[in-house]
Image (cartoon, helix red, strand yellow):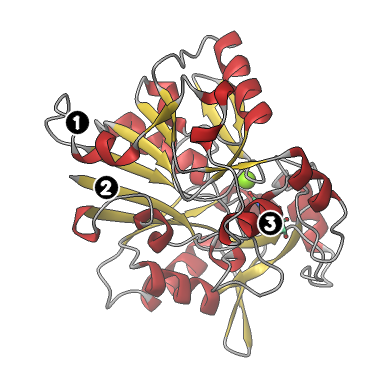
């Protein structure tokens, strides 16, 4: 068994969808598995020139690869079924490809209503926190209990460990949210309710020895959506928001913008054991013409994108990490 994992090193919205899409295109995976989160996530994917925003369904469907919502996720049945319909109506085949692990918990209308009242940390109001709360309180409902999901439910263990039709299982794990929102490593309580690191992927039934590459995805600046004050005072951040189209894919909320926090990024690289590192949206800073980052108590100002890239590469020179800087929506 081989597994590549895509993790977000900041606060979500760094372009995991794009990286997963690229990896699917260039590898022969047998499965793509979403390993955490629910429909709080919004993955923007450009496939054959068309824009898709998915919340639950992993990007394997675009390539005819089995796409599984893993046991570390929570799933909203209505949202899931409407996503299936939307993909089908856009010509993307989902039959026998999209599956849900039987032990995945479901987000109920009650969870949605409860989350809808939460203004404190500024959730996406998609019932995520209440669904995980009930899972851990041992009073949740699982996919296997829901008749409408009957055609989609699989036993993830037999799928991955006993399936004679796979010579070799080759998995792409697609994460949601990011390190800065992780329930344990993020800025608690301004966090989501799931595990957004490579450890979260391992909770979905694969041994640690299967892990091949860990793709860490970041942006060359940062964005965050939620209640805490995150944006700096420099008016350039409003420009970055416009140029970078930094508005939530799920809620449409404007994302708060700030410079890259190198220390957070480095911590995320270390915790996840990242060996492939992608920095997205270099084109945005090129357009804006400013390249800053924070490290320790300092803010570094660079005179060009290349200068900033060189500084970042220097910091990682003793680690075995392939670094890519990308300035394209649909390729890395
Ligand atoms: P929840 O996950 O809806 O409970 O929201 C908790 C925090 O995570 C809030 O600050 C949300 O804005 C943020 N969040 C949740 N999902 C995403 C995502 O996919 N991208 C960016 N932020 C997210
Ligand atoms: Mg997103």
In terms of image quadrants, where is residue 67? Answer: top left
Q: Which residue is mark 2?
A: 3
| Rendered location of residue 31, percent (x, y) | 32, 33
Q: Position of residue 230 (x, y in %)?
A: 77, 70
Looking at the image, which is closer to me, 67 or 229?
67
**Element at badge 1?**
loop
Residue 332 visible in the current orientation = no
Q: Is label 3 in a helix, a strand or a loop?
A: helix
Q: Is residue 183 left or right of residue 229?
A: left
Dot placed on the residue nearer the N-terminal end, 3 or 1: 3
Image quarter (top left, top right, bottom left or bottom right) of the N terminus: top left
154 or 271, which lies in front?
154
Q: CA distance from mark 1 to mark 2?
A: 16 Å
Residue depicted at 80% across the width and 70% down the height: 228
The image quadrant that residue 171 belongs to is top left
Q: Which circle, 3 or 2, is nearer the viewer?
A: 3
**Image quadrant where one finds the C terminus:** top left
273 left or right of 216 in image: left
Q: Position of residue 240 (x, y in %)?
A: 74, 54
**Residue behind label 1 places its C-beta within 8 angstroms of ligand 1:** no
Residue behind mark 3: 129
Q: Position of residue 3 (x, y in %)?
A: 26, 47
| Numbered disc 2: secondary structure | strand
Residue positioned 83% across, 45% down in the render: 113
């Amino acid at each position: 068994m081989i597994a590549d994992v895509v993790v977000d090193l900041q606060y979500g919205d760094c372009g995991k969808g794009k990286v997963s899409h690229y990896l699917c295109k260039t590898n022969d995976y047998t499965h793509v598995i979403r390993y955490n989160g629910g429909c709080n996530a919004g993955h923007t994917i450009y496939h054959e020139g068309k824009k898709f925003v998915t919340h639950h369904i992993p990007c394997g469907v675009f390539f005819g690869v089995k796409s599984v919502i893993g046991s570390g996720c929570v799933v909203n049945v209505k949202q899931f079924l409407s996503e299936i319909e939307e993909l089908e109506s856009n010509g993307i085949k989902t039959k026998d490809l999209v599956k849900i692990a039987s032990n995945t918990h479901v987000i109920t209308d009650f969870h949605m209503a409860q989350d809808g009242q939460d203004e404190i940390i500024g959730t996406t109001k998609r019932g995520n926190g209440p669904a995980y709360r009930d899972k851990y309180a041992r009073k949740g409902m699982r996919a296997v209990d829901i008749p409408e999901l009957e055609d989609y439910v699989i036993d993830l263990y037999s799928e991955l460990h006993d399936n004679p039709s796979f010579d070799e299982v080759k998995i792409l794990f697609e994460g949601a949210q990011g390190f800065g929102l992780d329930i344990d490593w993020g800025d608690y309580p301004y966090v989501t309710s799931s595990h957004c690191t490579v450890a979260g992927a391992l909770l979905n039934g694969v041994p640690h020895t299967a892990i091949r590459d860990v793709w860490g995805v970041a942006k060359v600046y940062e964005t965050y959506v939620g209640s805490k004050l995150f944006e700096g005072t420099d008016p350039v951040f409003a420009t970055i928001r416009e140029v970078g189209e930094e508005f939530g894919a799920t809620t449409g909320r404007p994302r708060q913008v700030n410079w890259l926090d190198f220390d957070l990024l480095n911590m995320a690289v270390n915790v996840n054991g990242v060996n492939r590192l992608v920095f997205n949206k270099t084109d945005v800073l090129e357009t804006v013409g400013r390249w800053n980052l924070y490290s320790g108590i300092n803010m570094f100002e660079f005179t060009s994108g290349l200068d900033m890239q060189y500084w970042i590469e220097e910091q990682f020179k003793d680690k075995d990490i392939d670094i890519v800087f990308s300035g394209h929506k649909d390729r890395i």
